[in-house]
């Protein structure tokens, strides 16, 4: 592989104008496609194989035109202190609002009157109007949303407190300035690392081009492929981070080759042949982790994984072709000014990476214990993990959705914000028996009479739990209803969907781990030609991801340092968070493993002893890996500033996971374990050595491409 990539790098360097033109043309085509594509709707959320999904499908079949998948809204009215919503003046305001809502949009299916729908609280202080729409939230027109908010504002000005909740107000997640700050920090780190504005600018420029192509392609295809609004955000998050990192490693190796006196074209070829090999395998691990999300069998998650994986593939291709082409344009400017003028002093003093590696080798047991125990302590909150899907209850109190949520909870009880929808596949007698059965259970606050469809062969029953939607008592009620009723009774609604989604995530975690870690283990076995090194890499990853999950629980569920990260309301952790973190963080963690340990193995197979190889690997790679990790942390941290709770949580989780994995696992635990293992770290059974393909990540074949240089002696491992 190294030889092929060497030729590819030299070819891109020589034909740099053609290569640059092709990538710019691809960016233009993707941009035009995104600009001319029809506006994307929200991705349809489905959970195949669950009872909640079967009930949802039955609703669409038996209650056609009811807008089962349509957006909903609740306009909540609260009377002044000492007054009631049944007072004639307040009642008139509500009725005016109902009339305004009904005539405000042709996308409305129904608007309920609280005085006929029993939607007034027992103490009379609160009432609400339910609004159902024909289309989902992302398909609502601006005029429809304005009609909803205007109706609330008009009533607000007539002496009532009015708040609007529901997914009808859902819009595309607002991006903050954090992403820009992350890129700026990345630029500063690159300048400090390279000492050259041109060398620092190359990774940023190429990463932005790659992300531009990836995100534009997703936008262009969003409507056709039914991609959700968060898909492009996550693809941008991951693509920007790996794009900068992959380019950083190639530029760094190019500068190192120039420092050894090689010609520019040869240096570019060797940088792509050596560092590029590591980029290919690191990218493959990320792609495996993201594509592997398909094993969960949640269409939304699968599409997110494939879209992000596509952006990673683009980042790899850009690193292998556009980077050497841009290096050709940069000329000597890729080197620092002092080096170009020959005033830079070569120092034989050990750098920070060398000193740290020697420290770890002298005290491997101490470093290993501190690293493992430290991450273990941070991981402890993960034992209290509570999973759920975010609702209006986790939004800031400054939003009308959150205030509407609280008003309904105060007026009607905490379970009112998460009603259960029971769908009966049967006649009226079956539905009435179901109502009686549910009333015989514990944990419900209200059970409505059955509402049959026109054909009389199905009915809907609404059950309001006593407790809040995310509580264990509500989950118990869902299971009790399912156990007490027959197969012709199905429970759905947002709360039941949440419970089924969380269960599906839990059930898929072990198979997903086995698939992703197993495939990556085989891949790393081929790269490192070792059994223990890939095993150590996988175990280290598990430690860092559990510690990161513990940090997420501490901040977003317990509220520790919540104000620092903009968390105004604690709540359960998003159901897909653990499995998503496993997928993404595993791929990113393997980046550092490949880049750092590949250089150690390169030194080892060229004759150095195990301890010396560890020091050599750190001397050449520690500074660059540190810069790459800081950049990735900065990029992910930028997404913490977003208003969307899911994106905020993912940004924080990925940032702390990279922090733990890069600086504790890869920089401390990995060298400590390798020092303790010695030669055994690179052991591989002879029969397996014969079976595995030789991918030449160390660049052994490149010795033949340098005329006049003797091929170095290699250690057989």
Image (tube, rainbow, N blue to C red):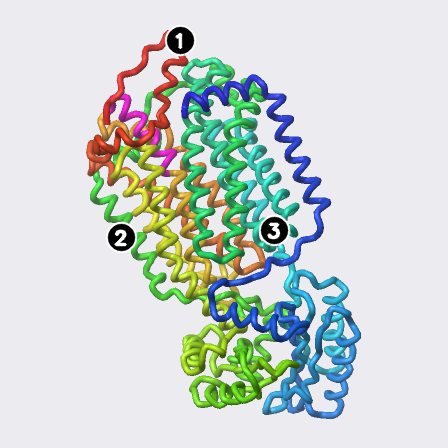
For the residues labelled 1 and 2, the Cα–Cα distance comes to 51 Å
**On screen, 707 above or below 212?**
above
Residue 446 seen by the camera:
no
What crowding class fits label 3: few (fewer than 14 Cα within 10 Å), some (14-19), or many (20 or more)?
few
Highlighted range, magenta = 593-608
Disc with the residue nearer the chain's start (2 vs 3): 3
Q: Which residue is mark 1?
A: 707
Q: Are marks 3 and 1 in contact (CB under 8 Å)?
A: no
Would you say residue 75 sits in the magenta stretch? no
What crowding class fits label 1: few (fewer than 14 Cα within 10 Å), some (14-19), or many (20 or more)?
few
Residue 491 seen by the camera:
yes
Which marked residue is nearer to the observer: mark 2 or mark 3?
Answer: 3
Secondary structure category for the residue under label 3: helix
Task: Give the residue displayed 54% in from the left and 36% down from the top.
Answer: 314
For the stretch drawn in magenta, what is the main secondary structure?
helix
Q: Quadrant of the C terminus?
A: top left
**On screen, 43 above or below 464?**
above
Task: Give the residue displayed 56% in from the left and 69% down from the top.
Answer: 57
Secondary structure category for the residue under label 2: helix
Can you give x and y, in whole percent of width and height, for residue 107 in the image?
74, 68
């Amino acid at each position: 592989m190294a030889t092929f990539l060497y030729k590819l790098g030299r070819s891109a360097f020589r034909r740099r104008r053609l290569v640059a033109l092709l990538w710019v043309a691809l960016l233009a085509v993707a941009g035009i496609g995104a600009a001319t594509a029809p506006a994307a709707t929200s991705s349809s959320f489905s959970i195949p194989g669950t009872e909640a999904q079967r009930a949802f499908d039955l609703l669409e079949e038996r209650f056609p035109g009811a807008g089962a998948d349509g957006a909903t809204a609740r306009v909540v009215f609260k009377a002044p202190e000492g007054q009631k919503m049944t007072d004639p003046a307040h009642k008139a305001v509500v009725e005016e609002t109902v009339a305004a809502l009904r005539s405000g949009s042709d996308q409305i299916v129904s608007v309920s009157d609280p005085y006929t729908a029993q939607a007034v609280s027992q103490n009379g202080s609160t009432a609400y109007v339910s609004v159902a729409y024909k289309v989902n939230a992302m398909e609502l027109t601006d005029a429809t949303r304005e009609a909803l908010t205007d109706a609330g504002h008009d009533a607000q000005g007539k002496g009532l407190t009015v708040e609007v909740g529901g997914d009808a107000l859902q819009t595309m997640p607002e991006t903050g300035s954090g992403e820009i700050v992350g890129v700026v920090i990345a630029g500063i780190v690159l300048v400090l690392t390279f000492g050259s504005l041109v060398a620092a600018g190359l990774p940023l420029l190429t990463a932005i081009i790659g992300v531009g192509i990836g995100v534009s392609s997703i936008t262009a295809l969003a409507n056709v492929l039914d991609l959700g609004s968060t898909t492009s955000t996550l693809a941008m998050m991951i693509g920007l981070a790996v794009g900068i990192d992959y380019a950083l490693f190639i530029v760094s190796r190019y500068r190192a080759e120039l420092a050894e006196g090689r010609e520019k074209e040869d240096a570019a070829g060797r940088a792509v042949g050596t560092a590029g090999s590591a980029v290919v395998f690191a990218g493959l691990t990320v792609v495996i982790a993201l594509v592997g999300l398909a094993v969960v069998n949640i269409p939304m998650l699968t599409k997110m994984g494939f879209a992000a994986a596509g952006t990673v593939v683009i980042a790899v291709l850009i690193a292998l072709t556009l980077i050497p082409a841009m290096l050709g344009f940069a000329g000597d400017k890729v080197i620092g000014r002092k080096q170009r003028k020959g005033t830079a002093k070569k120092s034989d003093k050990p750098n920070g990476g060398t000193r740290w590696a020697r420290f770890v080798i002298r005290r491997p047991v101490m470093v290993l214990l501190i690293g493992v125990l430290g991450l273990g302590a941070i991981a402890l909150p993960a034992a209290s993990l509570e999973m759920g899907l975010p609702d209006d209850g986790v939004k800031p109190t400054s939003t009308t959705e959150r205030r509407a949520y609280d008003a309904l909870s105060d007026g009607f009880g905490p379970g009112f914000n998460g009603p259960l929808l029971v769908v009966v596949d049967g006649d009226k007698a079956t539905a009435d028996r179901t109502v009686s059965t549910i009333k015989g259970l514990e944990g419900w606050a209200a059970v409505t009479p059955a509402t049959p469809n026109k054909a009389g062969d199905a009915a809907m029953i609404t059950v309001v739990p006593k407790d809040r939607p995310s509580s264990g008592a509500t989950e118990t009620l869902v299971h009790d209803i399912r156990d007490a009723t027959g197969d012709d009774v199905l429970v759905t609604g947002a709360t039941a969907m949440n419970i089924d989604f969380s269960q599906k995530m839990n059930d898929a975690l072990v198979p997903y781990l086995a698939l992703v870690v197993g495939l990556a283990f085989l891949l790393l076995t081929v790269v490192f030609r070792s059994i223990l090194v890939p095993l150590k890499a996988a175990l280290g990853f598990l430690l860092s991801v559990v510690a990161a999950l513990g940090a997420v629980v501490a901040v977003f569920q317990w509220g520790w340092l919540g104000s620092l990260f903009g968390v105004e309301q604690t709540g359960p952790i998003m159901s897909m968070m653990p499995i998503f973190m496993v997928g993404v963080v595993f791929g990113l963690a393997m980046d550092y493993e490949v880049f750092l340990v590949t250089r150690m193995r390169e030194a080892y197979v060229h004759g150095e002893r195990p301890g010396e190889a560890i020091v050599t690997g750190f001397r050449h790679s520690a500074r660059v890996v540190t810069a790459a990790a800081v950049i990735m942390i900065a990029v992910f941290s930028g997404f913490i500033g977003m208003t969307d709770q899911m994106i905020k949580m993912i940004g924080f989780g990925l940032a702390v996971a990279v922090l733990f994995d890069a600086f504790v696992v890869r920089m401390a635990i990995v060298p400590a374990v390798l020092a303790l293992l010695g030669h055994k770290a690179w052991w591989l059974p002879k029969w397996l050595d014969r079976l595995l393909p030789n991918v030449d990540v160390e660049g052994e074949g490149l010795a033949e491409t340098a005329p006049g240089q003797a091929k170095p002696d290699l250690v057989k491992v």
